[in-house]
Amino acid sequence: MSAVLERAEASASQIATESIETVASLNTITKRYTNGVLALDNLSLTLRRGEIVALLGPNGAGKSTAIKLLMGLSSPTAGTVRIFGADPRHTAARLRTGVMLQVGKAPEMLRVREHIDLFRGYYPSPMPYPDIVKAAGLETIEERMFGQLSGGEKQRVLFALALAGDPDLIFLDEPTVGFDIEARRGMWAQIRSLAARGKTVLLTTHYLEEADALAHRIIVINKGRVVCAGTPAEVKSLGSTAPGTSTSGSLKIIRCTTVLPSPTLLAIPGVTSAKLTANLATLISTKPESTLRELLTLDQTLHSLEVQSPALEDAFLALTSDHE
């Protein structure tokens, strides 16, 4: 074991000479499985030091494949994968990586404290035990068996194990599943704290509010390709330039009660979609000022008017929907 760690530490010195800004990258990756399924199609992405990146996409988009490649659990058909400038299967790279998987499990007859001590022993420079316990919020359950914990408590233990080696790159797969609101906000605070310390976090989540609240950058993939990447605000605005939408203006959601029929609503300048339920209309417009003026001109009885900026969910659906 000591010999392995010595080789790993020597290799780590070499890896440290690589760019400190680029922590991980997928470069023009193609991944085709033996059954012929094309999971990733010429995909590239980069993770930088000290940032939280949310990787989003519908089921089957290729998120899991991309993460497996970054973790060194799979190899690309074409392209290169680098973690700290090295192959992700390199021991030194793995010692600087922490992973929390949604499907993660741990022996149920070990105590929380024993799990943490065990995982800390795998690393040459682990995070101090008290820091792990505090970060994961485990102060009151350290002596309990893993099998006696609730779903949310088990998630916190798995988060603790991901931090055991004091990693510089952390993969978090649906980290707050089973959490109540208070616990979720507490986890968010810890993730932000990790980034503030220069750690890089790659997050996958079905809670788009979570991605919006946490991520410095969001990468949306669909059918194995990156369809959008940027800050949460940029992704929301780019939803208006997705296929089938206009390419100008700022995207807004307009709701109102109106007597106007759907064809008339869709003909209003800037309106890219219109949903009418009874007399309640929900419009998406890339020219909200023009749309509002036309609405009020066409229907002087219009009322219950609301104008909202799009949520990340709206942009996500626009970017990942199939258009002719």
Image (cartoon, rainbow, N blue to C red):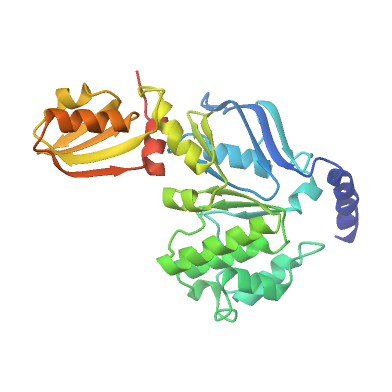
Q: Pick the quarter of the image with the C terminus.
A: top left
Q: Residue at x 70, y 41 (%)?
A: 24
Q: Nearer the viewer, residue 15 or 119?
A: 15
Q: Nearer the viewer, residue 38 or 276?
A: 276
Residue 160, picture quadrant: bottom right
Q: Identify whether 11 is placed above or below 188.
A: above
Q: Residue at x 40, y 37 (%)?
A: 315
In the picture provided, is 96 more to the left or to the right than 35? right
Residue 132: where, in percent of width, then height?
66, 70
Total number of numbered labels? 0
Residue 187: where, in percent of width, then height?
53, 63
Q: Identify whether 199 is placed above or below 40.
A: below
Q: Residue at x 37, y 35 (%)?
A: 317
Q: Residue at x 55, y 81 (%)?
A: 140
Q: Identify whether 258 is placed above or below 246.
A: below
User: Can you see residue 141?
Assistant: yes
Residue 30: where, in percent of width, then height?
61, 25
Q: Identify whether 308 is placed above or below 213.
A: above
Q: Pick the quarter of the image with the N terminus.
A: bottom right
Most extreme residue toward the top is 324
Residue 81: where, in percent of width, then height?
70, 34
